[in-house]
Image (spheres, rainbow, N blue to C red):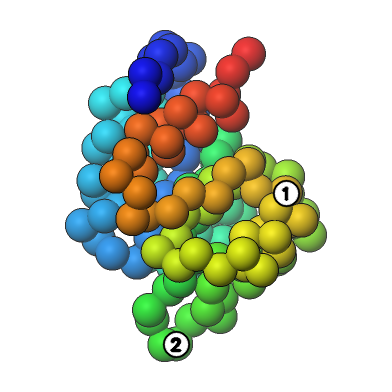
């Protein structure tokens, strides 16, 4: 698969909501290297929603499952439902599960893409999806 890289205008802010610190850092580093974006990482939707009050992102990369027990948004779907009440910010969801019903629910809520973490070319697909969101 050949994916063209485009230069993105500086200053785009991307929220990466992923409970695995290692994966969130890998995503953040790769996205920064390819797109020169300002990335903020969050372990769950609660932390990200709080930050959105003062710093709205240009894009959200959202995990589907959160492992923390004492959080309000237990899944990316719950977070997205609340987000859509006040914001149309683009969202790319990624997950380890392959549940078609979940995918359909997320698509109905207007996600820009749903990516499976297990795909060998996960990072390339993610970068390409981000580039698609930010095309002028």
Residue 129 screen position, x and y as percent: 51, 33
Q: For numbered disc 1, what is the local secondary structure? A: loop
Q: Residue furthest left?
A: 22
**Image point 70% across, 53% down: which residue?**
107
Q: Image quadrant of residue 108?
A: bottom right
- Disc 2: CA contacts within 10 A as few (<14), some (14-19) or many (>=20): few
**Image point 44% across, 60% down: which residue?**
95
- State the quadrant of the C terminus: top right
Sequence-wise, which precedes: disc 1 or disc 2?
Answer: 2
Q: Which of marks 1 and 2 is in front?
A: 1
Q: Which mark is residue 70?
A: 2
- Disc 1: CA contacts within 10 A as few (<14), some (14-19) or many (>=20): some
**Image point 42% across, 87% down: which residue?**
69
Residue 13 screen position, x and y as percent: 48, 35
Residue 48 screen position, x and y as percent: 50, 59
Q: Which of 25 and 100 is in front in this view?
A: 100
């Amino acid at each position: 698969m050949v994916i063209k890289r485009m230069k993105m205008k500086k200053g785009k802010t991307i929220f990466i909501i992923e409970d695995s610190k290692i994966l969130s850092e890998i995503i953040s580093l790769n996205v920064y290297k390819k797109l020169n974006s300002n990335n903020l990482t969050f372990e769950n939707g609660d932390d990200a929603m709080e930050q959105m009050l003062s710093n709205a992102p240009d894009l959200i990369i959202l995990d589907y499952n959160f492992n923390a027990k004492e959080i309000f948004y237990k899944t990316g779907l719950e977070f997205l439902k609340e987000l859509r009440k006040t914001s149309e910010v683009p969202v790319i969801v990624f997950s380890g599960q392959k549940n078609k019903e979940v995918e359909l629910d997320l698509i109905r809520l207007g996600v820009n893409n749903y990516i499976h973490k297990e795909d060998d070319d996960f990072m390339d697909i993610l970068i390409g999806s981000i580039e698609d969101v930010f095309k002028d």
